[in-house]
Image (cartoon, helix red, strand yellow):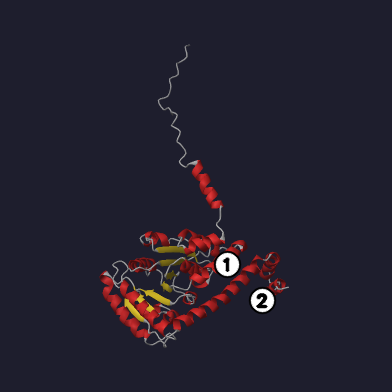
Amino acid sequence: MAQKKSHPSALKENDGIEQPDSISATSVEHIQQFRRKQPSAEELISNILKGDKVALSRAITLVESTSATHLEKANEVIKGCLPYANNSLRIGITGVPGVGKSTFIEAFGKYLTSIGKKVAVLAVDPSSSISHGSILGDKTRMEELVKDENAYIRPSASGESLGGVARKTREAIILCEACGFDTILIETVGVGQSETAVHSMVDFFLLLNLAGAGDELQGIKRGIMEMADAIVINKADGDNIKRARLAKVDFNRALHLFPLKNSGWSPKATTCSALTNEGISEVWETITDYFTLTKENGYFDKKRKEQSQYWMLETINEQLKLNFYNHQEIQKLLEETKKAVQNNEISPFAAAQLLLNAYFK
């Protein structure tokens, strides 16, 4: 019986055209060499003083690092930049989640650059307590300000620090000032009991709030109200204008109930809309009035000196904690002690004392 002839299938895969490499191997080599070459502390200082934002970012990365090698280099950079610092106005900006901090900062920052200011934004993003990750999306939210030549935005993760302040934000301020930025805006995670950390590193503390979000006088903790040098009711636009104006009256009445500040300044409440730019210039007028008053009565310089002393002590505490947990013997003993505490073989307080005694031997 004759065999049937096999016919080729109509479904046939042809050899495709080989695609060329999308990235040049030479370019990759150049990039890798560039990344491997780390600038010295002297080079970073020199470039920062020239206004180089790349050098500034690299220096802040060094400052935020927990590596002992990076710490030594970071301290050298800070020391070289310190004589050129302390020449800016430092403004802390906080508020309840959803109040529009990033939108306000972009509108406010654009206004400041339009009148000749150089603005650095140190935005602190919340870190997850589970994954310890952080979105760091402030540059995306401030897409117009990030393109401004006279602005610099640096998002940092809050980590485990209280009040949503990055561990090295204080040093980042010094580096930004040395780079020529005369107005530093620090955006915090939000309102919390430890927001005093922000207050202790800025000259002016601005609290953003919303109208119609419940009882305004109970919605913010008293401690935050007492620290605020000004309260701005944001999103005062559209149908919300009337509510914002009523909230402004309520807050101004409430502010008069608080004791007089050591600065001699009487905090004010005002309204603004970051979307329509209404009231943005008035916010800046309030801030400049504050600086004029505090510089004339000597409070500005006094507060700066107190803050420097405070952060010296805080840095000592932070470094002692870091050295303790990085100590090799303590790391071994810590695991054993944890198990003993979990098994109720030793109390947590006695275990802590045991570890401290071992560390200070």
Find residue 354 and report its horizontal and vertical position in percent.
Answer: 71, 73
The number of numbered badges drawn on the structure is 2
Find residue 306 and report its horizontal and vertical position in percent.
Answer: 51, 80
Residue that numbered label 1 is attached to: 75
Q: Picture quarter containing residue 116?
A: bottom left
What type is the residue that disc 1 sits on? Asn
In this rendered view, identify the residue nearer to me: 215 or 111: 111
Residue at 39% x, 79% y: name it: 291
Find residue 250 and report its horizontal and vertical position in percent.
Answer: 33, 82
| Image height of 285 relative to 110, above or below | below
Asked if residue 295 shows in the view, the reply is: yes
Badge 1 crowding class, 10 Å Cα cut-off, few under 14, some 14 to 19, many 20 or more, is some
Q: Are marks 2 and 1 in contact (CB under 8 Å)?
A: no
Real-space Cα distance between discs 2 and 1? 35 Å
* Disc number placed over residue 194 in the picture, else none: none
Going from N to C along the chain, the mark reached first, 2 or 1, is: 1
Circle 2 SS class: helix
What type is the residue that disc 2 sits on? Phe
Q: Which mark is nearer the camera, 2 or 1?
A: 1
Circle 1 SS class: helix
Residue at 36% x, 80% y: name it: 289
Q: Is residue 165 left or right of residue 110?
A: right
Residue that numbered label 2 is attached to: 349
Q: Picture quarter containing residue 191?
A: bottom left
Q: Quadrant of the C terminus?
A: bottom right
